[in-house]
C-alpha cells in the first residue's frame, strides 16, 4: 500500500494535527522525533508567538524536515504566519478554512509541500486543481472547526479517494490503530490524529482539559455554532449557553458575541472547564491515558499492524 511516507520525510504515515492552544513546539518536536509529521498549530498564534514555537521545535528535534505548520486561512495574519515559517526553514504546510488557491502556488514556488484540509470531495477536487500535494479529508467526527455538510469519515474517505489522484490523508474520529487501519482500507494514504494527541504529556493543553477528555463518554461532544463557524465542543457550561441560544434561533451575530475573544484559550490552555471553549473530537471517549508521544506512536503502529488484513501493513 502506497502511503504518504513517499511524499513526506516521515517513517510512519501519521500526522499529529495542528490544533489551537494545544499543538506547540514541544508537541510538534516530540512527534517529529517519534517518526511522524509534527505540526505547530498557528491558528491561536500571532506571528511572533509562532516564531517562538517553531524555534522551540527546531531546538527539540534532530528531524526538522518532519516539522510542519498548520495555518487556517480565515485569520487576517495568515500570510505573515506563512512568511515566518518559511524564514525558519519550514517546508511543509497544512492550510485550512479558506481557498486552496490563496497561497498554494506561492508556497510551492518556495519549494514547499502544501496539504489542504477538506470536508467534501468537491473541495478536494478544487484543492487538487489548485496544485496541492495532498488533502486531509476530515469527517464530521472531528474536533475543532468542522464542515457544514456533516459527512462522516467512513463515508467521506472513499468519496474523496475516488475524486482525486493526489494522496488522501484521513482525519476525524481516529484515535487508535483500529481507526488508522480502517481508513487505510478505505483508500487513505495516511491518517491525521488530533484529539488523541491532546491527551499526551507533551501537549500544551491544560491538565484540566486532558482530564476532562479522560472523563468523557460517547455523548460528551456536539457540533455547535453552525451559523457562525462550526466547531465540535466538549459539553460544559459554555456549550449549554451556546445550545440555549441556538435552540431559540440565535443569529450569527449573537453567537459571535457569546464566543467573544479568548474562549478557546480560557478552556484549553488555562483550564477553565466551565466558561472555556473546549474543542474536541468524538473519539474522546476512547481515550483513557496520557502517554508520551513516543509511547503513543509506537502503540498506534502496533495496533494498526494487528488490525490490518494480511498484506496491508505499513
Image (tube, helix red, strand yellow):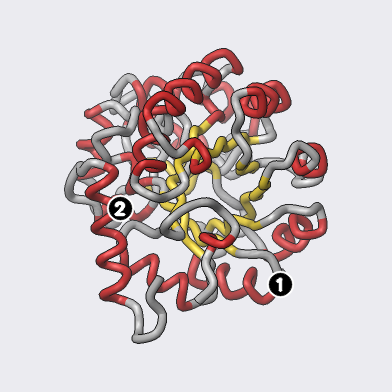
The vertical placement of 283 against 94, above or below, is below
Residue 163 is tagged as 1
The vertical placement of 196 against 183, above or below, is above
Which residue occupies 39% across, 66% down?
180
Which residue occupies 58% across, 35% down?
250
| Residue 227, percent from left and from top | 62, 41
Contact, mark 1 vs mark 2 (Cβ under 8 Å) = no
| Residue 242 horizontal side relative to residue 200, left or right | right
Say which of marks 1 and 2 sits in front: 2
Outermost residue toward the bottom? 310
* Label located before the other in sequence (1 or 2): 1
| Residue 272, percent from left and from top | 30, 22
Which of the 4 image quarters holds residue 267?
top left
Is residue 52 among the parts visible in the rendering?
Answer: yes
How would you rate the neighbour count of disc 2 (Cα within 10 Å): few for under 14, some for 14-19, many for 20 or more? many
How would you rate the neighbour count of disc 1 (Cα within 10 Å): few for under 14, some for 14-19, many for 20 or more? some
Residue 297 is tagged as 2
| Residue 278, percent from left and from top | 38, 34
Which residue occupies 36% across, 41% down?
33
Which of the 4 image quarters holds residue 93?
top right
Residue closer to the observer: 162 or 30:
30
C-alpha gap between disc 1 and disc 2: 30 Å
| Residue 302, percent from left and from top | 25, 65
Residue closer to the observer: 6 or 132:
6
Is residue 247 among the parts visible in the rendering?
Answer: no
Residue 151 is tagged as none
Which of the 4 image quarters holds residue 167?
bottom right
The vertical placement of 177 against 30, above or below, is below
Amino acid at each position: 500500500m502506497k502511503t504518504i511516507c513517499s511524499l513526506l520525510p516521515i517513517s510512519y504515515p501519521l500526522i499529529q494535527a495542528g490544533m489551537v492552544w494545544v499543538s506547540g513546539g514541544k508537541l510538534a518536536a516530540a512527534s517529529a522525533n517519534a517518526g511522524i509529521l509534527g505540526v505547530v498549530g498557528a491558528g491561536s498564534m500571532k506571528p511572533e508567538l509562532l516564531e517562538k514555537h517553531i524555534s522551540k521545535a527546531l531546538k527539540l528535534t534532530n528531524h526538522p524536515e518532519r516539522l510542519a505548520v498548520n495555518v487556517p486561512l480565515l485569520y487576517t495574519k495568515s500570510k505573515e504566519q506563512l512568511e515566518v515559517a518559511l524564514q525558519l526553514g519550514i517546508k511543509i504546510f497544512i492550510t485550512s478554512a479558506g481557498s486552496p488557491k490563496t497561497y498554494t502556488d506561492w508556497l510551492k514556488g518556495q519549494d514547499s509541500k502544501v496539504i489542504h484540509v477538506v470536508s467534501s470531495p468537491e473541495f478536494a477536487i478544487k484543492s487538487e486543481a489548485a496544485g496541492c500535494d495532498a488533502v486531509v479529508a476530515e469527517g464530521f467526527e472531528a474536533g475543532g472547526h468542522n464542515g457544514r455538510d456533516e459527512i462522516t469519515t467512513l463515508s467521506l474517505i472513499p468519496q474523496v479517494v475516488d475524486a482525486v489522484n493526489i494522496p488522501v490523508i484521513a482525519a476525524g474520529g481516529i484515535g487508535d490503530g483500529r481507526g488508522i487501519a480502517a481508513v487505510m482500507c478505505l483508500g487513505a494514504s495516511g491518517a491525521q490524529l488530533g484529539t488523541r494527541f491532546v491527551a499526551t504529556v507533551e501537549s500544551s493543553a491544560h491538565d484540566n482539559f486532558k482530564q476532562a477528555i479522560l472523563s468523557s463518554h460517547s455523548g460528551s461532544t456536539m457540533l455547535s455554532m453552525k451559523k457562525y463557524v462550526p466547531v465540535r465542543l466538549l459539553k460544559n457550561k459554555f456549550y449549554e449557553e451556546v445550545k440555549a441560544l441556538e435552540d431559540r434561533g440565535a443569529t450569527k451575530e449573537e453567537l459571535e458575541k457569546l464566543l467573544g475573544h479568548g474562549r478557546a484559550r480560557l478552556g484549553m490552555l488555562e483550564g477553565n472547564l466551565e466558561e472555556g471553549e473546549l474543542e474536541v473530537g468524538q473519539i474522546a471517549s476512547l481515550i483513557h491515558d496520557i502517554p508520551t508521544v513516543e509511547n503513543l506512536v509506537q502503540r498506534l503502529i502496533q495496533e494498526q499492524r494487528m488490525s490490518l488484513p494480511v498484506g496491508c501493513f505499513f
